[in-house]
Image (cartoon, helix red, strand yellow):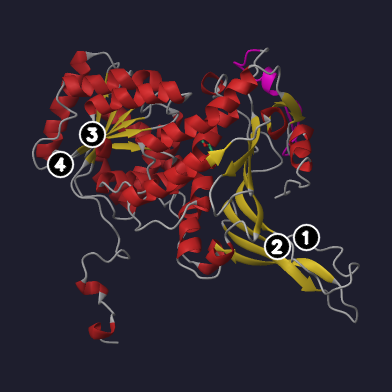
């Protein structure tokens, strides 16, 4: 094929999106480096990026925490975290290269001397490692520390980029616990960093399968014509976890399932499933379309009948006994925190009017699975005998976010034999079978995007605020409505959630 026919030689096109995107000179400063997230996700992701050749040779990693560590101690902590949690095999040469750029600053967030030292370290790294003044500050700390940390960065002239370089703030959830607190956090952060310098992490957007929702919908002709109220009966978005709250009592109690994952991960999945095609695949256009969805979301009039919150009680899981939520270490025995939440939402626009979106999530459920099931209406007319179609369910397209990443299509088919009998069958796409490469971890993708300044996969201020606007009335209603329902650990949630769908003549899928 010639270039005249529209084919562009990728070797000649520097903007070819298929070529690996490699970060330029830069460094990452992590606040809260002793936390779980940092050890299990951030440090391994940095190593995996280095191992894949996607970081610049002088990449630098600075840890900041209240520990009496020297640089070597910090490097050892990173080393152990990488050995235990990295996705790619450990290679000594990659490690040695990475370790050259590791520094540690002991101190707490109000410690001016420590921030002075951070400033000096950043300048030292610019000289020794060639980081070029480009630094991202990752706030892997509880939100109550955001104001102090960003103000300290400002006070020590770390937030302002020297000319020709960049400075960025990366912020982990929870981003507030309601609209008012989210607005306040946004105000505090934007006092110091401009909107395009702030990268809010919703790690679900870094998952390959989540990005594939847009590929599936907008790169094909097959699905989009039926992706609307004329064909779709309802949508179920499930994020089920088999784990309990582990050692996270301090964070989780008082927050609960809805604030922990519906406000962010599940509403993002809903937006990607429901949004219109963006004018282009860039941050501004993506946000524009997602925001339209959030603004069109309508809560049920009767929150008592169409939302459910519950807590797990003792039960069995994975062959072992599991204690109830109220017996978990560090949990107040009168806590009303939800470990399970289910809500029915509608989207008031031309595409979706009248199509319910059921969202549910929970800890200590039957198994770990996240999926989006688009359930289609039954055929308007069936020429088959009603006995022949007795076993037939609804057609469904299921996007399996995790595990067993892929897409399943369910439809009716004739059972072999002399009679006409129809039954549901499935057609499957599995990432593991269709591609040889394994999927990068969400944090690899997101950290790389921060270093590249690519904001597509990061929720903007308005999205965060709109999603709290959706959740706040539900939380307020729950606050005033007695104790949560209950479900035994290891089951698929409370009976109240089944009753909620039964009221609409539907039932939850058993993934
Ligand atoms: C986090 C929540 O955002 O997502 C956790 O705070 C939850 O409670 C986790 O366990 C689940 O992430 P993943 O990627 O394992 O589905």
Q: Is residue 101 above or below residue 405?
A: above
Label 1 environment density (alpha carbons within 10 Å; few <14, some 14–19, many ≥20): some
Label 4 environment density (alpha carbons within 10 Å; few <14, some 14–19, many ≥20): many
Q: Is residue 435 above or below residue 30?
A: below
Residue at which label 4 appears: 129
Left or right: 315 with respect to 42? Answer: right
Residue at which label 1 appears: 393
Badge nearest the viewer, 3 or 4: 3
Left or right: 412 with respect to 416? Answer: left
> Foreground residue, 234 or 208?
234
Residue 289 coordinates in the image, percent (x, y): 42, 49
Residue under the image location 59 percent in, 61 percent down: 407
- Quarter holding the N terminus? bottom left
Q: Is residue 363 above or below residue 387?
A: above
| Residue that protrudes farthest toward the bottom in the picture | 1
Q: Is residue 463 above or below residue 18?
A: above
Residue at which label 3 appears: 194
> Foreground residue, 312 or 296?
296
Marks 3/4 in contact by CB < 8 Å: the verdict is no
Which stretch did the figure color magenta? 313-332
Judged from the image, the secondary structure of the residue bearing numbered disc 3 is: loop
Q: Is residue 179 magenta?
A: no
| Disc assigned to residue 395 | 2
**C-alpha distance separating marks 1 and 4:** 61 Å
Judged from the image, the secondary structure of the residue bearing numbered disc 1 is: loop
Q: Earlier in the sequence, mark 1 or mark 3?
A: 3
Left or right: 416 with respect to 272? Answer: right
């Amino acid at each position: 094929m010639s270039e005249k026919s529209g084919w562009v030689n990728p070797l000649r096109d520097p903007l070819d999106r298929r070529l690996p995107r490699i970060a330029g000179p830069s460094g990452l400063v992590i606040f809260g480096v002793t936390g779980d997230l940092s050890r299990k996700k951030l440090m391994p992701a940095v190593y995996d990026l280095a191992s894949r050749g996607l970081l610049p040779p002088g990449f630098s990693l600075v840890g900041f925490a209240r520990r009496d560590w020297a640089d070597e101690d910090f490097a050892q902590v990173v080393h152990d975290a990488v050995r235990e949690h990295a996705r790619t095999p450990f290679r000594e040469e990659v490690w040695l290269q990475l370790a050259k750029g590791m520094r540690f600053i002991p101190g707490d967030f109000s410690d001016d001397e420590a921030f002075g030292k951070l400033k000096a370290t950043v300048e030292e790294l610019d000289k020794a490692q060639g980081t070029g003044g480009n630094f991202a500050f990752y706030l892997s700390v509880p939100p109550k520390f955001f104001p102090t940390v960003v103000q300290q960065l400002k006070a020590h002239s770390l937030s302002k980029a020297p000319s020709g370089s960049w400075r960025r703030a990366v912020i982990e959830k929870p981003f507030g616990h309601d609209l008012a607190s989210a607005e306040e956090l946004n105000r505090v952060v934007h006092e110091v960093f401009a909107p395009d310098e702030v990268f809010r992490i919703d790690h679900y957007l870094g998952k390959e399968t989540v990005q594939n929702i847009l590929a599936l919908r907008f790169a094909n002709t097959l699905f989009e014509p039926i992706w609307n109220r004329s064909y779709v009966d309802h949508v179920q978005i499930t994020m089920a976890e088999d784990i309990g709250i582990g050692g996270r009592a301090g964070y989780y109690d008082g927050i609960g399932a809805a604030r922990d994952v519906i406000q962010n991960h599940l509403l993002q999945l809903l937006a990607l499933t429901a949004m219109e095609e963006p004018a282009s695949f860039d941050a501004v256009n993506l946000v524009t379309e997602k925001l339209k969805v959030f603004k069109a979301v309508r809560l049920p009039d009767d929150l008592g009948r169409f939302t459910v919150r519950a807590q797990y009680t003792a039960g069995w899981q994975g062959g072992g006994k599991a204690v109830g939520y109220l017996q978990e270490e560090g949990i107040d025995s009168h806590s009303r925190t939800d470990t399970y939440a289910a809500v029915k939402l509608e989207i008031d626009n031309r595409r979706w009017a009248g199509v319910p979106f059921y969202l549910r999530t929970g800890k200590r459920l039957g198994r770990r699975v996240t999926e989006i099931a688009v359930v289609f209406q039954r055929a308007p007319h069936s020429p088959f005998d009603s006995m022949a179609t007795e076993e037939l369910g609804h057609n469904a397209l299921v996007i399996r976010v995790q595990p067993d990443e892929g897409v399943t299509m369910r439809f009716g088919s004739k059972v072999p034999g002399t009679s006409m009998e129809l039954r549901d069958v499935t057609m499957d796409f599995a990432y593991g079978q269709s591609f040889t490469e394994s999927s990068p971890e969400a944090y690899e993708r997101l950290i790389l995007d921060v270093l590249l300044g690519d904001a597509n996969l990061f929720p903007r201020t308005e999205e965060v605020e709109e999603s709290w606007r959706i959740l706040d009335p539900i939380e307020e209603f729950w606050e005033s409505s007695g104790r949560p329902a209950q479900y035994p650990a290891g089951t698929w949630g409370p009976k109240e959630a089944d009753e909620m769908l039964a009221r609409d003549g539907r039932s939850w899928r058993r993934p």
